[in-house]
Image (tube, helix red, strand yellow):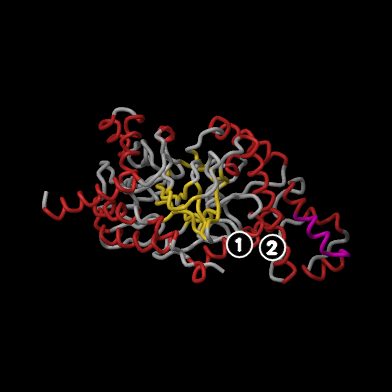
Amino acid sequence: MNRVTIHWILLIIGLTANAAEQRDQFGGWPGVRGTKTGFFHAEEVNGVWWLISPDGNGFFSKGVNHVSFMADNSPALGYSPYARVTKEKYGAAETWAEATATRLRGWGFNTIGAWSSRELFVQKLPFTVILNLAASAGANWQKGEVADVFSPKFEQAIRPQAQKLCAARAGDPFLLGYFTDNELRWGADWRSKKSLFEDFIGRSAEAPGKQAALRLVRARFDSVGAFNQTFGTTLKDFDELARLTALPMTSDTAKSLQREFLRDYARAYFKACRDAIQAAGPNHLVLGCRFAGSAPQEVIEAMGEFVDVVSFNNYSFTPPAEGLRNLHRLTRKPVMLTEFSFKAQDSGLPNTKGAGKPVPTQQDRAAHFERYVSALAQMPFMAGFHWFEYCDEPAEGRFDGENSNYGLVNIKDEPWQVLVERMTLVNVRIEEGHRAANRSRTDP
């Protein structure tokens, strides 16, 4: 071990020990005081948004996603290579969870992010749970398939899902909050070229979502003749609307109907999810649905009433400042960047599948992390960030083919030392930087 390494170790030990002394049992920072409620909540203090710990101290969520004992299964291998390592090294998930929570604390992280092993939830480290509510009602975020939120079956599906995942945790002060879903499709994107209005117009006449779309059409036109003139159809009466499965979407009226339908859809979704969560566990934050890179304005406007925090995923080299600012401006709620990462070419992994462009080295990963999260902390409406992910993906590819160096540790459970050392130094300073956020430069 050389002198430089020893210097880094001693410096990090000193910083983390000092930081731990300055935190409450939940990782809250006494440098900012909010209302003590016994559970996490969001609060604006002196023009800066924070999550407030159950003890009433400022909390900027510094999390890691998919902290998993099993990690990713590789279909090409027929097993999870990381799981083979952890089973041999730790024996049981509970032993792994204790060691992993200690690691994360030592690296300055204070939150367990989405898709993490339940064994971590008893490690006295704040954690989040992703509920997959729309997914339980038929949505598929990977394929872009959307659930019919206007159907009674939607609520009938999400209520039991929320009850199953929330009720038993209703009194847990270490639970930060719930994500309703992940990266739902809200319109035309890489998964589909259709708007949601077009999607539902194409469904059967009995579908509640199609009926909702047709009600908008009827309310917009005072006669079938006016409708025909706008869309180039030859309907005899409005009763024939139900037989339509497609409409041209080029006119201003058509685009307006798409926006209006999307707003109604989003409001129905967020309200149903909020109500289901509160019925099962009213004490915890509703953390949004983890927008994938962008979100239509109509969706953002509709959600403000029903979430406590807006969550957003992004894989650019710098934070999308204008987009994040817009999320806050339209909802008046704090924002968390809930998925981001950097992968390096010197990792030995292919890095050919998965979001983001690879950087040359682990030093570059570390430098990009510092710049990215430091910029986030300077935005007074931000309330945290969650890194994707704890362990690298298998070189042979996971379920969707991703094979990238996103991890804090490699498949052998060895830390990427350059990265985690820099993360440690950066993480312990985040709260100070956030408290000093310049509202006049970053928030309208």
Residue 422 point in image, percent of width and height: 28, 56
In percent of the image, x 37 and y 40: which residue is there? 71
The kind of residue tagged 1 is Pro
Q: Which residues are magenta?
A: 213-224
Q: Residue furthest left?
A: 2
Q: Left of 7 or right of it: where is 245?
A: right
Q: Is residue 222 magenta?
A: yes
Residue at image mark 2: 259
The dot on residue 296 is: 1
Work out whether 249 lies above or below 292: below
**C-beta proximity under 8 Å, tags 2 and 1:** yes
Image position, residue 306 (x, y; %): 64, 50
Coordinates of residue 123 in the picture (x, y in percent): 39, 34
Q: Residue at x 62, y 59 (%)?
A: 331
Q: Name the residue type under label 2.
A: Arg
Taking 233 as reference, is 113 left or right? left
Residue 149 lies, with reference to residue 194, above or below; the image says above
